[in-house]
Amino acid sequence: MSEEITKPWERQERESAEAFSAFRCYRDIPTNRSYAKVADKEGKSQQLIERWGAKYNWQERIRQYDNALDREYFEQSKHDIREMRKRHKSTINALMNKLIPNINTIQPGDISKQDTYKFAVMLMQADRLAHGDTVAMSGALELNSTVKVDNDPTEGIRALLLSPEATAAAARILELAGSSKDDSGRNS
């Protein structure tokens, strides 16, 4: 039977319950840890806290604890980014599946074909980003001469999100795409 290894931030062998309580207090201080804060919170002298800190190697244990938290945070962040990309891919695919086949069904005056093209380019940029491509699509993009985007795919997405014109154009494209007829003559 294998022995369970005690983690550095857990109670150590021969560490008293009082000393571990003080260490836990020290460990759980979110920022600017100090023995003085622990002494105040635990109602002990600072000298006693300093002795326990030296005897039970608090600094190294805290370093290992912080590193373990950082690793956990990093792994959770990687997972969250993967999930976000999946959501973005799904949304982008849905938008592109509606937009691309229906570009030619947009009637004059509904929205300019230039704005439709620009929105499609922004969707493609967003698609590339959602797939992890960090290479910017070349060229400059302008939305009705009010928002200029040069060689940075994230700027196109920001422009879409922040520009009332672009947002209205996107909404109109989706409205038109949603109300267009499919090949069988039915509304899609």
Image (cartoon, rainbow, N blue to C red):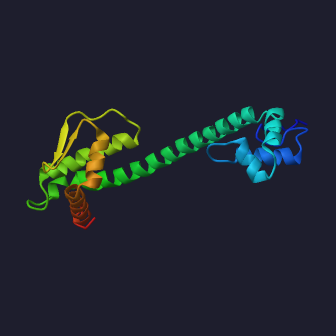
Using the rendered image of the protein, determine whether residue 6 is visible from the camera's viewpoint: no
Q: Residue at x 66, y 38 (%)?
A: 66
What x and y, as percent, mark residue 156? 26, 45
- In the displayed structure image, the side of residue 134 where residue 169 appears, left or right: left
Q: Residue at x 13, y 62 (%)?
A: 110
What x and y, as percent, mark residue 97? 30, 53
Q: Residue at x 81, y 40 (%)?
A: 47
- In the displayed structure image, the side of residue 135 where residue 87 appears, left or right: right
Using the rendered image of the protein, determine whether residue 130 is visible from the camera's viewpoint: yes
Q: Is residue 170 above or below residue 51?
A: below
- In the displayed structure image, the side of residue 66 where residue 87 appears, left or right: left
Name the quadrant of the C terminus.
bottom left
What x and y, as percent, mark residue 39? 76, 47
Q: Residue at x 27, y 54 (%)?
A: 162
> Splitting the image into 4 quarters, where does residue 167 fall?
bottom left
What x and y, as percent, mark residue 40? 74, 51
